Amino acid sequence: MRGGASREAAFDSPSATRPRLSGAMAPPLPSPSMAPPGLIHSAPGLLDTCALPQPPAAATMSGPAAETPSAIQICRIMRPDDANVAGNVHGGTVLKMIEEAGAIISTRHCNSQNGERCVAALARVERTDFLSPMCIGEVAHVSAEITYTSKHSVEVQVHVMSENILTGTKKLTNKATLWYVPLSLKNVDKVLEVPPVVYSRQEQEEEGRKRYEAQKLERMETKWRNGDIIQPVLNPEPNTVSYSQSSLIHLVGPSDCTLHGFVHGGVTMKLMDEVAGIVAARHCKTNIVTASVDAINFHDKIRKGCVITISGRMTFTSNKSMEIEVLVDADPVVNNFVKRYRAASAFFTYVSLSPEGKSLPVPQLVPETEDEKKRFEEGKGRYLQMKAKRQGQAETQA
């Protein structure tokens, strides 16, 4: 059995030791100007990136390392090589920054008690909405906070703010929830237990448990797709699934990996976003931007030296949005004992924009096969469900 199987089994385990109900959840994160000396760089090569530990008033951890912060902030200026063809920051770049923040805080927490050392690996990303575009020259403030722990997993909630450093204007661009599992440094196929957090109110623990159970059920529903393969079609007609489907083949090198030899979750998400963007652009022949990412499930680790195939296909179109399914398959070409396997899967939603940045109608997808028609109806169901949820939230706020 591969390591990913045990990883998912451990991730499904219910919470064991319950934390004491004391302490407080994290306060609003301070601005970069309040950063203490001795900033810690979050990743090699990002010299302008820093992880700012938050004050001990944040949610405390039980155990000998109770001073370990449960909230951090990463800051980085957006450069030209972060841009998409429209000049805004690439959605995959934002997803990568979100994952970096989550990996730092969850790894710190999982090593906050004496015991076997570990690294936190990304297992799942909940639905992420791109609320506002980020521009080159702006500063991204990525704030991450631990909000729940089960026996073998950590929930991290992340907010991304963009700052115009000329005017001081700030705006919320992204919100995301990520789930991590701790993998032993001695054996990355071994999942360790997570130190529990301390909640200020019992309701916080109960709400976190409900989120945990909900994502567990949703992740199980995606497993049946693991055998699905996207096959190329010769001379496809415009607006069909085959016409816009795309694949990218990538050899995993050292720069894609952690120090322990498997791929950063953020690297995988960026490649998935690139393929989804190609599918959307081929379909509508206009500028496109990421509107949201449905839950990304990481089914298995991808090791250094693997050849990965990232495949995308259109599944559904509404009047002004496109849903694209992206599948990631890994092929350990230097290991004859491990066969090609499904490593990750997700649904991306894109919108079409005019040169002025206004939303445009999307050419309607023409499903041809029975499988394509079935996927179209499933996508329509997800679209209507999310639309109803947004309307309900708007009515509640009103």
Image (cartoon, rainbow, N blue to C red):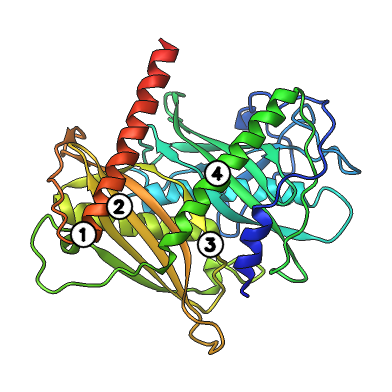
Q: Nearer the viewer, mark 3 or mark 1?
A: 1
Residue 129 placement (x, y as % from top left): 41, 37
Residue 28 placement (x, y as % from top left): 64, 24
Q: Residue sitting at 53 percent across and 62 percent down? A: 299
Residue 370 is marked as: 1
Residue 72 placement (x, y as % from top left): 66, 38
Asked whether the viewer can see residue 26, the reply is: no
Q: Residue sitting at 38 percent across and 18 percent down? A: 394
Image quadrant where residue 122 sits: bottom right
Residue pointed to by mark 4: 215
Cα distance, mark 2 to mark 4? Answer: 20 Å
Q: Residues within 10 Å of mark 2 (few under 14, many from 20)?
A: many
Q: Residues within 10 Å of mark 4 (few under 14, many from 20)?
A: some
Q: Secondary structure at mark 2?
A: strand
Cα distance, mark 1 to mark 2? Answer: 18 Å
Q: If you read the primary sequence from the N terminus, does the residue marked by circle 3 or circle 4 appear first?
A: 4
Cα distance, mark 2 to mark 3? Answer: 19 Å
Q: Nearer the viewer, mark 4 or mark 1?
A: 1
Do residues under tags 3 and 4 come within 8 Å of each other at their CB atoms?
Answer: no
138 or 116, nearer to the observer: 116
Do residues under tags 2 and 3 come within 8 Å of each other at their CB atoms?
Answer: no
Asked whether the viewer can see residue 229, the reply is: yes
Cα distance, mark 4 to mark 1? Answer: 29 Å
Residue pointed to by mark 3: 299
Q: Is residue 331 above or below residue 56?
A: below
Q: Nearer the viewer, mark 1 or mark 2?
A: 1
Q: Is residue 177 above or below residue 124?
A: above
Q: Is residue 325 above or below residue 143?
A: below
Do residues under tags 1 and 2 come within 8 Å of each other at their CB atoms?
Answer: no
